[in-house]
Amino acid sequence: MTDPSDEPGLEGRPGERAGFLGFVAHEVRNPLATALWSAELLVRLPAEERAGARGEKLAGMCLRSLGRVRQLVEDHLLCERLDAGGIALRPEPVRAREALEAVIEHRPKGTGTVELDVDPGLSVRCDRPLLDRLLETLVAVAGLEGAAVRIAARERGAVVAFSVAGRPAGGEALQDPAKGSPSDVHGRALALPL
């Protein structure tokens, strides 16, 4: 396995960067258009209909679409900051099981189960917000469509390796998407490459 820091980022490959940005632009525009359309219809509804089933449906569409846009924008901006070395890392010791339990506790209701195989004493030295983001992303992607998730963590010398099993992600899941890559209705198209 190669060290990711040895791999050139997209900044050195203009064609690939253009394809990546085209994908991101497309992924942001579609749910944003849905959110705007839903909000416009909601505003036009008479007050009594806004509080009814139709209003709830439009509000739900708007919220889901805006959540998707938010996820994409956050992932894109974090990708850019990591590529540019624009994040000051603050390593600290973190108990792996406690970090995972915090992520699991904040999952939306109605998601699948998560089973942990992590020694409570296992500690990892890392930037806590980035670890939380990484674990939240892995659990969310592995648990899409209600799939059960199993997470194990093992110490291997100076490295702690996390293993996440759940919904299969597909062969290209860790590759930067490009124009024409499949969309993700959950807004997590950039989550695994990130």
Image (spheres, rainbow, N blue to C red):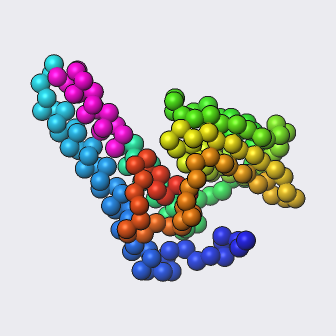
Taking 105 as reference, is 22 left or right? Answer: left
Which residue is more in the foreground, 82 or 54?
54
Taking 96 as reference, is 69 left or right? Answer: left
Quadrant holding the C terminus: bottom right
Q: Could one spot residue 116 in this view of the protein? A: yes
The correct choice, above or below, for 83 with respect to 104 in the image is below
Query: Which secondary structure is most common in the magenta stretch?
Result: helix
Q: Could one spot residue 103 in this view of the protein? A: no
At which x and y percent is residue 56?
Answer: 27, 27
Taking 86 as reference, is 73 left or right? Answer: left
Residue plotted at (77% across, 40% down): 117
The correct choice, above or below, for 94 with respect to 112 in the image is below
Q: From which residue to which does the magenta span run?
A: 49-65
At which x and y percent is residue 3?
Answer: 70, 71
Q: Is residue 180 magenta?
A: no
Quadrant holding the N terminus: bottom right
Taking 104 as reference, is 52 left or right? Answer: left
Residue plotted at (38% across, 65% down): 23
Residue 123 found in image quarter? top right
At which x and y percent is residue 6?
Answer: 66, 76
